Image: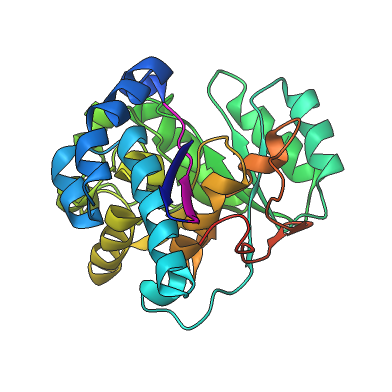
């Protein structure tokens, strides 16, 4: 967590170092500390984009700057982003990878939630999805492969997933195998996750995916994430607002990305033993806008 002080005002941001991209807590803290001078000299969000690469360190600082700027202006952060209000959104609820029977049990317990996201990655993937579908027949389903499938697996499973009513397949192939998707007409829309961080990957994704998962930790903060959202929408791509497993402080700025998104996956606090106080209000799967005491 980053906290920036200006007189009596405090701006805060939270990020999660992600090992998939070679990030460690120690490295992220060192990167933040390395820009202490410019921050204390009055660093702007635009200048921050040039000082740090996309990732957790820039995300924490960028979101803290948004929070502080909103408090200085006496406005909400979404007003600064050009929105009159922030509406509640419904989030997916994630089912961890496990045996089909275990995932069915978890799905049964969450069957009243409108959108479930299930992790796959192994020889029993079709059994997993069938078990979840049987346990939660009314829920919309997202399948998240986390780069675990081959192209042959995808072509075989996508037909079956369509039969089971799956609405989206997230990151089916390893990011470096994306070229295989060019020209593939999937029976279930595909969503890029590990393949998309910032606008620099957008053109390549546009020819391979129908949707992009925008996460603040990948984009390096709300500033780039909002720009990515605008650019992706202009290309006709659907938007998924995603997250790492983190507290409500990390989810709050992502709610700006979630406005009008086709899919929202901001259930991080629901997967923790304990959220921070004050946190976001989750009414089932509905997330209320953040209080000023939390962020923005």
Indicate the position of residue 210 as horizontal and vertical percent values: 34, 56
Residue found 66% across the figure and 37% down from its top: 129
Q: Nearer the viewer, residue 112 or 278?
A: 278
Q: Is residue 168 magenta-colored?
A: no
Q: Position of residue 145 (x, y in %)?
A: 48, 32
State whether residue 199 is above or below residue 255. above
> Does residue 215 appear anywhere in the picture?
no
| Place of residue 236 in the rendered image (x, y in percent of width and height, measured from the top left) | 28, 68
Q: Is residue 244 visible?
A: yes
Residue situated in front as seen by the camera: 83 or 266: 83
**Quarter-of-image position of residue 21:** top left
Please identify the quarter of the rendering in which residue 206 is found.
bottom left
Residue 16 falls within the magenta-colored stretch? yes
| In the image, residue 229 above or below residue 93 | below
Start and end of the magenta stretch? 8-17
Tell me: 137 left or right of 211: right
């Amino acid at each position: 967590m980053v906290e920036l002080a200006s007189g009596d005002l405090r701006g805060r941001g939270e990020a999660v170092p992600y090992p998939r991209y070679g990030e460690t807590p120690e490295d992220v803290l060192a990167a933040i500390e390395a820009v202490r001078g410019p921050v204390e000299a009055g660093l702007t969000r635009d200048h921050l984009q040039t000082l740090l690469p996309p990732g957790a360190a820039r995300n924490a600082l960028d979101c803290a700057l948004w929070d502080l700027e909103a408090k200085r202006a006496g406005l909400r952060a979404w007003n600064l982003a050009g929105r009159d209000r922030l509406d509640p959104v419904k989030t997916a609820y994630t089912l961890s990878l496990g045996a089909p029977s275990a995932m069915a049990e978890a799905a049964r317990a969450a069957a009243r939630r409108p959108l479930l996201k299930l992790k796959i990655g192994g020889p029993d993937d079709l059994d997993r999805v069938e078990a979840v579908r049987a346990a939660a027949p009314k829920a919309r389903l997202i399948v998240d492969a986390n780069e675990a499938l081959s192209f042959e697996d995808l072509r075989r499973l996508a037909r079956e997933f369509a039969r089971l009513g799956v609405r989206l397949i997230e990151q089916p192939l390893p990011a470096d195998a994306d070229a295989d998707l060019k020209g593939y007409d999937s029976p279930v829309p595909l969503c890029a996750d590990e393949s998309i961080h910032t606008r620099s990957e957008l053109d390549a994704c546009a020819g391979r995916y129908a949707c992009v998962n925008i996460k603040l930790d990948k984009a390096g903060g709300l500033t780039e994430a909002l720009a990515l959202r605008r650019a992706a929408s202009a290309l006709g791509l659907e938007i998924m607002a995603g997250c790492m497993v983190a507290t409500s402080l990390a989810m709050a700025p992502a709610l700006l990305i979630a406005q009008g998104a086709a899919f929202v996956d901001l259930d991080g606090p629901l997967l923790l033993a304990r959220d921070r106080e004050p946190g976001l209000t989750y009414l089932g799967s509905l997330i209320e806008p953040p209080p000023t005491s939390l962020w923005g």
